[in-house]
Image (tube, rainbow, N blue to C red):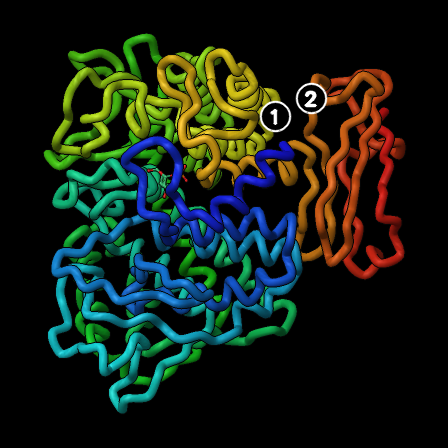
């Protein structure tokens, strides 16, 4: 774990490159990396994170997409000069995930009211058109019709990212895959592809955004949600059209046309509760849609979520002539966004174990072997099975699966998933790498790209906030250990250090009687405790907590 904590620093310095494996980047960092690296900083070195977050929102475009070429300085983004540009449909998701962790760790809900500019270049209408009138002279910030720079709150930026995604659906009323999603190698289904996996993830964002808006209202940070006038149609639209794909697409198209060059500059104040109710309605609609249409099963009755539609408009997973096809990504985000009932979660967990778990090579593979070069989905099927995004144990997705398992109270399964990664990395004869988390383990269990991976940030975060269970809760410190008995050392102890509220805190749990998760509690009989932020100053830096 010490080495894993160091990996995000290497990644920030070196970008995604400079390792003796070919084919990987030119030293740059992408949009996801930017937001992901912030997660690790929040636990290890949070002092500049607030500014970093605010600056990075300057990369969002008014159409909810974002700049993809990242400059040298914090908040510096470079115009895309391509005539054909790619839009990754998951990009709009990560800023909120990171901002929400920041808010939980610090209690700084006020950050959502801070204003920043929007990015502008010639890519417009979510990368489907070019704004021929735009030139460098006009600069890289979004202007209004009178030529003034438009500044919106971070909340406005987040609403635009998540709402535009909600309306950008394909023929199954699932958010379109566009250039690809988190899985960069799903890059050949831009016309008809849809990502159920990340539609689930957006539903989670919409719900959590709604709860922050209500919390801001309760704390009198805001009374209204202030957004550009053009965007009100994304919020006020009649819920009965959610089922109507054409009408939904039309709502988005109208908005995109209105803001293709400039915004009017008019700001409208919407009632906070109305906006929150609308976001919740949208999230509920997605949950219902997924539960109604996206469950697939095999002939033995195992069932799980179909993660994608391909460029031929077909569901990708389920039982086929080539055997059972299953992908991990949809399962991760259906669980992480808590869209499933307990029984559904049980069947996802059992199916993933059956079809994807291979502890000899790191644990959960990203997909089963499709036995086909599936060019109506992506170049991933051009990789040999077990390499990179095609069937390897792709650490980032495996760690996110663990995180989702913990969030659903599946502590033993979450630990099993992390332990498989850990054991494989430590098995030098097979992994041929120093301890740490690689980007992926291949079919032979060899770890590749031994440190430049976003998986390190997620592993760190998952260990601290889920496994050790130490996390911010609207700024207060919540401690709810979810350690299993193997995680305590020979003295029955397990400890972790982190920076919280400006303090270097070390928490040691002692579990003398060797109890397992579920069996132990704190001495007062409770299983979790919250130390309010104002009491933290008077709390010792070293917390020693007995589990009985
Ligand atoms: C890499 C990319 C990341 C992408 C992932 C899957 O992951 O950096 O943006 O989502 O592949 O295609 P990493 O090297 O961070 O594990």
Q: How far apart in space, not on screen, are marks 2 and 1 (Cα)?
A: 8 Å
Which sits in the foreground, 441 or 317?
Answer: 441
Seen in the picture, residue 523 relative to 217 is either above or below; the reply is above
Residue at 12%, 45% (x, y): give it.
191
Which residue is tagged 1?
Answer: 411
Q: In this view, does 454 lie to the left or right of 46?
A: left
Q: Position of residue 129 (x, y in %)?
A: 13, 64
Which residue is tagged 2?
Answer: 484
How many residues crowd around disc 1 within 10 Å: few (fewer than 14), some, or many (20 or more)?
many
Residue at 48%, 35% (x, y): give it.
451
Tag 1's secondary structure?
A: helix
The answer to whether any part of residue 330 appears in the image is yes
Q: Are marks 2 and 1 in contact (CB under 8 Å)?
A: yes
Q: Which mark is residue 89?
A: none
**Quarter of the image where one finds residue 47:** bottom right
Q: In this view, does 214 lie to the left or right of 371?
A: right
């Amino acid at each position: 774990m010490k080495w894993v904590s160091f990996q995000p620093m290497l990644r920030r310095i070196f970008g995604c490159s400079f390792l003796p494996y070919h084919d990987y980047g030119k030293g740059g960092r992408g949009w996801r990396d930017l937001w992901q690296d912030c997660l690790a900083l929040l636990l290890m070195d949070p002092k500049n994170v607030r500014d970093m977050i605010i600056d990075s929102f300057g990369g969002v475009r008014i159409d909810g997409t974002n700049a993809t070429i990242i400059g040298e300085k914090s908040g510096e983004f470079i115009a895309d000069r391509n005539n054909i540009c790619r839009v990754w449909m998951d990009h709009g998701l990560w800023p909120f995930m990171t901002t929400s962790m920041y808010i939980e760790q610090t209690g700084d809900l006020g950050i959502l009211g801070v204003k920043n500019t929007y990015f502008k270049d010639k890519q417009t209408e979510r990368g489907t058109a070019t704004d021929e009138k735009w030139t460098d002279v006009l600069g890289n910030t979004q202007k209004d019709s009178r030529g003034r720079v438009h500044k919106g709150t971070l909340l406005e930026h987040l609403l635009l990212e998540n709402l535009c995604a909600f309306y950008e659906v394909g023929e199954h009323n699932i958010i379109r895959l566009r250039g690809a999603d988190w899985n960069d190698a799903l890059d050949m289904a831009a016309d008809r592809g849809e990502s159920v996996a990340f539609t689930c993830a957006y539903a989670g964002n919409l719900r959590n955004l709604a709860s922050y808006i209500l919390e801001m209202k309760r704390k009198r940070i805001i009374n209204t949600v202030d957004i550009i006038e053009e965007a009100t149609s994304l919020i006020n639209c009649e819920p009965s059209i959610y089922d109507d794909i054409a009408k939904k697409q039309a709502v988005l198209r109208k908005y995109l046309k209105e803001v293709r060059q400039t915004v009017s500059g008019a700001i409208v104040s919407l009632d906070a509760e109305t906006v929150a109710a609308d976001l919740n309605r949208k999230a509920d609609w997605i949950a219902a849609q997924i539960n109604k249409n996206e469950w697939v099963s095999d002939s033995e009755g195992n069932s799980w979520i179909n993660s994608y539609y391909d460029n031929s408009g077909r569901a990708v997973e389920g039982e086929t002539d080539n055997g059972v096809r299953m992908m991990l990504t949809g399962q991760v985000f259906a669980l992480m966004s808590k869209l499933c009932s307990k029984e559904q979660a049980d069947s996802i967990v059992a199916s993933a174990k059956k079809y994807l778990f291979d502890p000899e090579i790191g644990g959960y593979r990203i997909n089963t072997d499709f036995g086909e070069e599936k060019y109506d989905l992506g170049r991933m099927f051009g990789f040999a099975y077990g390499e990179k995004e095609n069937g390897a144990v792709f650490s980032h997705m495996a760690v996110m699966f663990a995180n989702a398992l913990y969030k659903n109270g599946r502590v033993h399964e979450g630990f099993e998933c992390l332990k498989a990664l850990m054991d494989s990395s430590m098995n030098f004869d097979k992994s041929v790498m120093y301890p740490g988390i690689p980007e992926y383990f291949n079919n032979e269990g060899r770890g590749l790209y031994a440190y430049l991976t976003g998986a390190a940030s997620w592993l760190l975060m998952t260990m601290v906030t889920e496994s050790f269970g130490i996390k911010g809760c609207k700024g207060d410190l919540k401690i709810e250990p979810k350690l299993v008995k193997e995680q305590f050392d020979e003295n029955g102890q397990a400890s972790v250090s982190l920076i919280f509220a400006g303090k270097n805190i070390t928490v040691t749990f002692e579990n003398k009687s060797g109890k397992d998760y579920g069996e132990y509690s704190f001495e007062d009989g409770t299983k979790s405790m919250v130390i309010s932020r104002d009491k933290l100053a008077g709390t010792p830096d070293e917390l020693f907590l007995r589990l009985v």
